Image: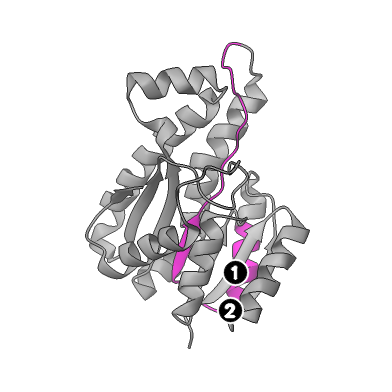
Amino acid sequence: MAKTIVVAGFGPGISSGVAERFGREGFNVALVARNADRLASGVQALTAKGVRAQAFPADLGNAADVRAVLEKVRAAFGPINALHWNAYAGAAGDFLTASPDEIHTALDIATVSLTVAVQTVLADLRAEKGAVLVTNGGYGLPVDAVDEAGVNYGAMGLSVANAAKHKLVRLLATRLAADGVYVGEVMITGTVKGSAFDHGSANLEPTAIGDTFWKLFHERTERRVTL
């Protein structure tokens, strides 16, 4: 039976590179996001390359939706071998003016929803010796210049969410190591070509990021790679 990867938070850029790389290795690819048109385009592109892919629309900021969509993936493809968490929210840009709901949105997607996703597929991950592969960003780094950028560019919510997500990855990696489940992250510190942040000067190729995630999944030696 073919293995299955869930690409949660699918869109152009990082997650497209991951979907193509794992699809090339024979994985079924479940694309999850809110935007149905984007999902349909992704499925079409992957299918054209011989990848078995299917769209699963869901709001990854809603814990009930997270549980429900992962059960739909299991019903369609069978056990889940890898969970790629690429979802994030750019809410709460300025903590001095952000509402509690905005702050919750930023943190919930980065930590609560990711945790719920892991809990939902945990039995599969343990049985299949699977992996949790997390996209993270440089805004979470504890560096003065990064903190200044987070404030100046209205990314305070994203900065705190990324820092919390990094700690969560480390805790999950430690907790699940004895079960043979790998947990790791790729820390993106540049701009990804083809992404919403690409204004013509992006320096990171989605295919290279996909290769990096595949190497983490395959080798399982490092918890974090920074690009």
Q: Residue furthest top?
A: 96
Left or right of 14: which side holds 63?
A: right
Q: How many marks?
A: 2
Q: Nearer the viewer, residue 157 or 126?
A: 157
**Element under disc 1:** strand
Cα distance, mark 2 to mark 1?
8 Å
Report x, y in % for residue 226: 32, 46
Q: Which residue is painted at 56% across and 55% down in the image?
A: 13
> Can residue 71 be found in the magenta stretch?
yes
| Type of the residue with mark 2 | Phe
Q: Residue furthest bottom?
A: 1
> Can residue 114 be found in the magenta stretch?
no
Q: Residue furthest front?
A: 200
**Element under disc 2:** helix
Q: Which residue is painted at 47% across and 48% down in the image?
A: 115
Report x, y in % for residue 59: 69, 50
Q: Nearer the viewer, residue 175 or 6?
A: 6
Above or below, 182 against 149 in this view is: below
Q: Which mark is residue 152?
A: none
Q: Which residues are magenta?
A: 67-96
Q: Which residue is mark 1?
A: 30
